[in-house]
Structures are given as structure tokens and as C-alpha cells.
Image (cartoon, helix red, strand yellow):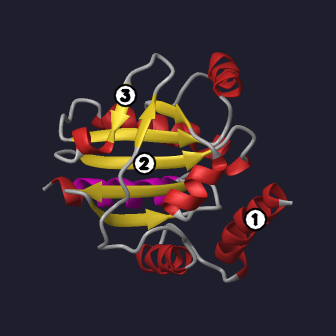
Amino acid sequence: MKISLLFFFWIISFSISYSQGYNLANPSELKEYIEVVKKSTEGPEIGSRFPDFTAFEFDGKKLSYEDLQEKLIVVNIWYVGCTGCKQEEPFLKMLTDELSTNENVIFLSFAMSSPKKIERYFSKRGDFGYPTASVERSWVKEKLNITLSPTHFIIKNGVLEEKISLPLAQPETLNWFKSRILSLLN
């Protein structure tokens, strides 16, 4: 049932852009569309402290929020089987490739799937440039108050600066997200 609801929300978010006639190539309409989607995004409030976390990548490397607070942290919440998550992967890979030389930004991914499922998925499709930790869906709900995927967060100095539950699967939305990252790096 939850997966059906997640898929339903994803379809609705894309339907908004088409049914309301948004032209995402038009900067003012893109901004309006982003604002509509952001209003429905769950999670901590923008401007609040982001919850502490500790997770482990597949190679055993510890991802500790405390150790990363000096960096701009970009978080992606997803799961294997999420259609919107799959669609945005090439765009996320472009983003991480473009910003890979910037030592002040780190990309993290929390996948609500088992480690085996994620490893199988990455072995078939490759990763998208984010270090990935397997987390329980209940942890994401309790810790981050998120039930929809994909959801993206940008955190600076421990404070949530941006959040959106939307596949970044169009050049316009990816460019908006990238511009938010770059503006927070300055």
C-alpha cells in the first residue's frame, strides 16, 4: 500500500506540471512549479537543525553527520524499484561528476532497500555518484519524517537549507537544484 501511495504522489507531482500547463523551460513557471512541489515535501523544516545520523556504506566506511558538518551535504532518499529514482540517476551522476572536484560538498544517499538488493541493483546499472548506505524505511520515517521518494536535502552548517520530493529527471529541475547547491557553496 505504501509503495502505491509513493507512486501515486510521484505521478501527481509530474501531473501538476502538465495539467497546469507549466512550461519548465520558462524560468518563472519553473520557479512556480518548484514552489508548488516544495510545499508538499515532508521532512524537517527548512532552517531547522538536520537530525544527527550515522550510517555505513557497503565497504564499511562510516558516514557520520558529526564528521561532515563542515561540508555542504546533499542527501538523496530513495529505494530500489522507485521509478522516479531510477529516472533521475543519469542526472544525479552528471551533477556529482560536475561537482566532484569541489571538496566543500559531499553527496550521500540513503537507500531504503536491503544491502543485497542495492548491490545487485548497482552491479546491473552502476551507481550514480553518491556514497550509499542501506537504511530501514522506519528509520527514514522516524528520523527524517519522510515517506516519499525520491527526496533531496541540502544541509549547510548543520541546518536544512533546501528540501524537495521530486525526481530531478529533467534538465530544468536538475539545473535548479545545482544552482541551489552552488549558491550555498558561496
Residue contact at pointers 2 and 1, CB within 8 angstroms: no
Amino acid on which the number 2 mark rests in the picture: Val
The numbered mark at residue 11 is 1
Can see residue 130? no
Q: Nearer the viewer, mark 2 or mark 3?
A: 3
- Pick whichever of labels 2 and 3 is earlier in the sequence: 3
Residue contact at pointers 3 and 1, CB within 8 angstroms: no
- Quadrant where the C terminus is found in the figure: bottom left
Is residue 107 rendered to the left or right of residue 122?
Answer: left
Q: Residue at x 48, y 59 (%)?
A: 172
Q: Residues within 10 Å of mark 2 (few under 14, many from 20)?
A: many
Amino acid on which the number 1 mark rests in the picture: Ile
Q: Quadrant of residue 115?
A: top right
Amino acid on which the number 3 mark rests in the picture: Lys
- Pick whichever of labels 2 and 1 is earlier in the sequence: 1
Chain part drawn in magenta: 171-182
Residue 129 percent location from the top left of the image? 44, 30
Q: Quadrant of residue 10?
A: bottom right
Residue 110 percent location from the top left of the image? 52, 42
Q: Residue at x 38, y 58 (%)?
A: 51
Residue wearing tag 2: 75
For label 3, the SS is strand
Q: Disc 2 versus disc 3: distance between alpha carbons?
A: 15 Å
Foreground of the two, 121 or 181: 121
Q: Residue at x 44, y 36 (%)?
A: 55
Residue wearing tag 3: 62
Q: Residue at x 31, y 71 (%)?
A: 48
Residue 120 percent location from the top left of the image? 70, 19
Is residue 116 rendered to the left or right of residue 38?
Answer: right
- Quadrant where the N terminus is found in the figure: bottom right
For label 1, the SS is helix
